[in-house]
Image (spheres, rainbow, N blue to C red):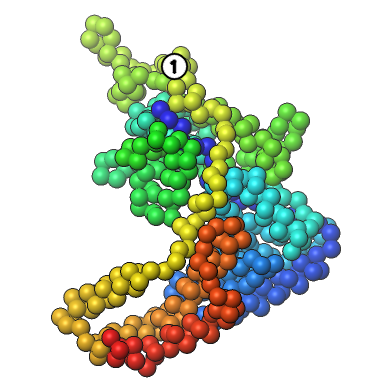
Amino acid sequence: MLCLSHHVDTFKEAFYLNGDCIKYNDFIEDLITIKNQAQEIKDINNENRFIPFTIDGIMWHVMSTSVTGYSVVIKNNDVSIAFRKKGNTLSDRNPSVKIEYRAQFLVLYGLQEAHKKINDYFQKNIHNDYLSKTQEIHLASDIQGHTFTMFDTFSIKTRAQKKWGYLGEDGDLGKEFVYTSDRLETLYFGTSSNKLRIYDKTVEFKKNPDSQHIEKLWKLNNGDNYKEHKDVWRIEFQIRREKLKQLFTENKEPYDYTKVLLENLDGLWNFFITYFSYKDISEEDSINFIRGYRIKKDGTPKLLTKEAKRQIRKKAPIHPLWEKIKHFSSNKPPYWFRFNQVKESQPVYAMNAVCGLVSTITKQYGTFTPEILQEVIQKAEDRSYKNNDIGLIDKSFKKLQDYFAKVEQQSRLGLDIIETPQDFTDNFSFFVWDALSPLKNGSVAQKI
């Protein structure tokens, strides 16, 4: 068995503001004004309905939609932040800000450094007097060389109260099982406020290219020991504030205070490892659990009582996998894989795009002419507006906005990027619109 990584996969915190919040509330009013402009954008995908907005050199998307209870949301490649105006300092006890960290951002820097970057930025540019409390955190360990099966549902013991998927006589086990084509992919134990999730991570990141950054971490941590052709299973503990505030350090400090949690990640991991105990139960005992009885030496069956099952689990040793991952040590890679980096454009990219366009239209119409191309473009535009979607030109424009925002962010991180003329980066909206305008009159089709 190989432990590929320990890391934080999800982190959400909330800010309870103190002091004078007049400037903060004015700032929210400005964001709401920008949000109203974003709401005028037509697009069936709300993720595309945003207005770019820069704060202290950092590009944000001010979204057209928000989350329940909050006025406005801004996003970038690192975090998503939800804001609401701060009421009376004494009577308004609810958090005014909620922040959700992206998984890639957490993997890149580690939780402590990622948290410091965002909090320093918030204090400098938005509001400097607040208390941070953790809303949710997921701690994960990725392992290779061990495969989980349905038998493991009897090997993992938890004190969590059942919520769904009741199985067998153990009323204190909440379990759910997910299969695809008779292949076990996911196991859940516990409830939403305190859950253990075990799943085949290889299946997930093959389906979702955005998850493949984690494979780079596995290779970085383990070199040639990591085998690309073998499955990786993730052991992920999820805990929310309603449970965190019931946990305390030796100094009686509650874990929901973010400062306390950051200083005691190993202690939180130890809580999980103890709460969800993985016992090394034999396959024979697991089969007996399923049947509900065991076969005695004389060949007759004997009912397995709840106490008999409890004794089997009690006597079973801790599984070697749990011993291997019992200490949490978060690894983080260097800067070189911040994103799939923006690279210098090559003619082959344009060639492939044109080949795809010609091939698709020819398959549909049986031929390819400038008139058919113009007709297809016009139909696409008409369909977009009919569905209240953004048009082709506007969509291309927004993709380029995202592209250059990524270039700027990578530049700040010291990554290799393309060299972009300053006059273009300052005025690229003008140049983009000018370059795409032939689509409107069909001259592109004529040239092709």
Q: Quadrant of the C terminus?
A: bottom left
Residue 34, quarter of the rendered image: bottom right
Residue 45, quarter of the rendered image: bottom left
Q: Residue furthest left?
A: 366
| Residue 271 placement (x, y as % from top left) | 59, 30
Nearest to the observer: residue 288 or residue 283? 283
The residue pinned by badge 1 equals 316
The residue at the point 84 percent across, 63 percent down is: 20
Nearest to the observer: residue 430 or residue 208? 430
Circle 1 crowding by C-alpha within 10 Å: few under 14, some 14–19, many from 20: some
Q: Quadrant of the N terminus?
A: top left
Task: Let me know if residue 3 appears in the view.
Answer: yes
Residue 410 placement, left or right of 309: right
Q: Residue furthest top?
A: 298
Tag 1 secondary structure: loop
Q: Is residue 179 above or below residue 326?
A: below
Task: Let me know if residue 306 appears in the view.
Answer: no
Kind of residue at badge 1 = Ala
The residue at the point 37 percent across, 30 percent down is: 146
The residue at the point 47 percent across, 87 percent down is: 434
Q: Is residue 331 above or below residue 347?
A: above
| Residue 342 placement (x, y as % from top left) | 47, 63
| Residue 190 placement (x, y as % from top left) | 50, 37
